Each structure stands twice: as structure tokens, then as C-alpha cells.
Image: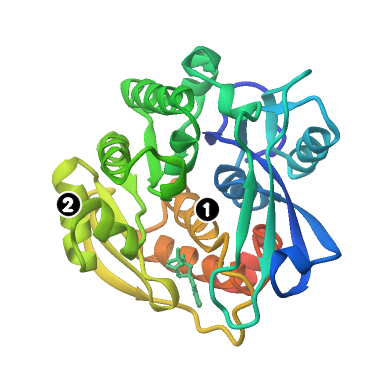
Amino acid sequence: MIPNSTDAGLDVVTFGEAMMMLVADRPGPLEQAQAFHKRTAGAETNVAIGLARLGLRVGWASRLGADSMGRYLLSEMQREGIDCSHVDCVPGQRTGMLFKGQVSDGSDPPIEYHRQGSAASRMGAQDIDGPWLCRARHLHATGVFAAVSPDTLALSRQTLALMRGAGRTISFDTNLRPSLWGSTEVMRREINQLASQADWVLPGIEEGLILCGERTPEGVAAFYLAQGARLVVVKLGPEGAYCEGTHAGQAVKAYVPGFPVEQVVDTVGAGDAFAAGVVSALLEGRAVLDAVRRGAWMGARAVQVLGDTEGLPSRAQLQEAGL
Ligand code: AMP
């Protein structure tokens, strides 16, 4: 697999909003923070970076403002070897950004988004280059970009429909952002509708209660399998994950334990790292349990660093870990 592809034959394509992230340099309320570390953020781009570091050919389609934040994000993605031929920098539109605090007790850090009306939020189904998309082997989609605006929801629906129609595989991380949706009911309906179009569905256990009314990993998996998913992997935080379904003719139903970590620095990005691990391994033809183990290891690395992407391993680091 050759990184930096700009034409046909990508392994994975993803659509999503990238944001510039400023992470406070020490714990405490955000309003008291004086200095920040600059990083990239965005669920889909985190996964894209994770896949690209492992040598997969990845395409990311998006829109940025023609501002310094947009140029920063674009150069970071290009540096990772991601095909950005479908990223537009639009004059007069803004790039989204966020502030993230630090915590010292392993809890979820405070996050303040400034993304409303951003360039990416104005993308719609008309921005999809269907032939480019459908030449890829796989689409990775998340509930985040679907939540950003009615137009990105339409775009999300259309990308899944096109890839499904082309017979490609699709992974979908439910990735709930309740504050971006009009109501819980709408969020539940739209996310479950998108999930019903995917082959591999990756919900978190707490999301399962909101989306499926199920408290157990088995209940959440049964819900999405009944909707048409072929494989469901339910994320369980430090406990690891539960997977159930069929892949490459093999039925699977198993718990995969988490990798213990000494200190949790920042929980954000664990699910994206996990998705990159699972998706990369499945696309390489690995067995489901190996794929979930890789995801769990990558998720465990992600919680030990401040940003969302510095824990994402290279192929050499993965091989060193025997994964
Ligand atoms: P989450 O979205 O929090 O469930 O995290 C995604 C994945 O990352 C989990 O399924 C675990 O495999 C891994 N993970 C998350 N938190 C931890 C943790 N505290 N320790 C070890 N692994 C973790």
C-alpha cells in the first residue's frame, strides 16, 4: 500500500470536519488557562491519520476556511500522507476550532467548540465526487459529521448510499454529539438510520442505552445486527470491547479485554484510535478478534497522551507490539 495516493485506488475515504484544537498546558478551568498546545482535532481525521500511519491509502474530503487554521490543518493532513485532493479552502468562510482543558483525574476533559457556520458545516451532498468515492475500497463515517448541519447529514446519507450501491464496505462509528442535534429523538432516528446502511458498526456502551435502549453489549449488538449490520463492536472503555457478527464467513461473539494503562491523561480520541485499529486490520484480512485487539491497544495508547493523534502508532510500532 502506497501512502500519498492522489488518484484511484484509495483504501479508505472519509468525509468530515477537521478543527484546530488548543489544549490547555495544565489542569484547571479553561478560563484560567494562559498557554495552549496547538493540535488537530476531528473524529474522521483522527481515524484517517491512524489509518495513514499504518500505511493505508486514505482520502479525506472536506472544506476549510482560507485562513491560517485551514492552512495548518491541510498541511498536517498532507504531512500524514493523506489524499487531500478533495479538500477545498474557501475564502470568506471560517475553519472550526475548539479549546480543550486538562484534567488530572482521568475524567473527560472540558471542551468548548467554535464550529457553528464553519466551512465544513456548509458542505452538502452536491460536494461528493461519486466516482472518486466509489473507487475506494471502504468508507469510514461517523455520527459527528452527520450532526454538524442538515447539509452534512444529507451528505452523510448520500455517501453511505453510494458506497453501499457500489458494493464497498462501510464502517460507522455512532460517535454521539447530543448538543449538535435538535433533540435526542432526532439524533436516535438519524444515527440508527445511518448505522443500518453500514457493515461494521462501532457504538460505545453508553451510547447503546441512548440509541437502542439496551444496557448490555449483547443487547446493543443484537439491535444493530437486526438492523442489517454484519459486525458490531461495542466499546467498553478500560474494559475493552465486545464483538458479535460475521466476517469473512466466520461467526464471532466474544469479549476482548482492554490493555491496562498506568495513567489516563486524556480520554478523547480513544474511540477514533480504536476504529482505526479495527478497520485497518479488517481491511488487511485479519480475523475479527485480532482486529478488535488491535483497536483496544490503539485505544489504550490514545488515552495516555494529550492530543487525539500522537498516540496513533506507526506500522513499525504495531509490529513491535505483535499486532
Ligand atoms: P471508549 O470510546 O472510551 O470506550 O474507548 C475506545 C476503546 O479504547 C475502548 O474500547 C478500549 O479498548 C480503549 N480504552 C478506552 N479507555 C481506556 C482505558 N482507560 N484504558 C485502556 N483502554 C482504554
**In the image, residue 309 above or below residue 118:** below
Which circle, 1 or 2, is nearer the viewer?
Answer: 2
SS class, disc 2: helix
* Nearest to the observer: residue 136 or residue 106: 106
The one nearer the camera, 193 or 33, is 33
Among numbered discs 1 and 2, the one appearing first in the sequence: 2
Pinpoint residue 89: horizontal percent, then vertical percent: 75, 23
Across and down, in percent, residue 244 comes to: 23, 60
**Amino acid on which disc 1 is placed:** Ala
In the picture, the quarter occupied by the N terminus is: top right
Q: Where is residue 263 in the image (x, y as percent from the top left)?
A: 61, 84
Q: Residue at x 38, y 30 (%)?
A: 168
Dot label at residue 318: none
Q: Is residue 44 above or below residue 236?
A: above
Is residue 62 visible to the viewer in this orientation of the structure? no
Q: Is residue 304 left or right of residue 93?
A: left
Pointer 1 with pointer 2, Cβ within 8 A: no
Q: Around disc 1, counting alpha carbons within 10 Å, would you say few (fewer than 14), some (14 to 19), or many (20 or more)?
A: many
Q: How crowded is mark 2: few (under 14 residues within 10 Å), some or many (20 or more)?
A: some
Circle 2: residue type = Phe
Q: Name the residue under label 2.
A: 223
Left-right relation of 219 to 167 = left
Q: Distance between the residues labelled 1 and 2?
A: 23 Å
Q: Is disc 2's CB within 8 Å of ligand 1?
A: no
Q: Quadrant of residue 146 in the image? A: top left
Residue 26 sits above or below residue 147 on the image: below
Q: Nearer the viewer, residue 182 or 157?
A: 182
| Residue at which label 1 appears | 276
Q: In the picture provided, is 82 more to the left or to the right than 203?
A: right
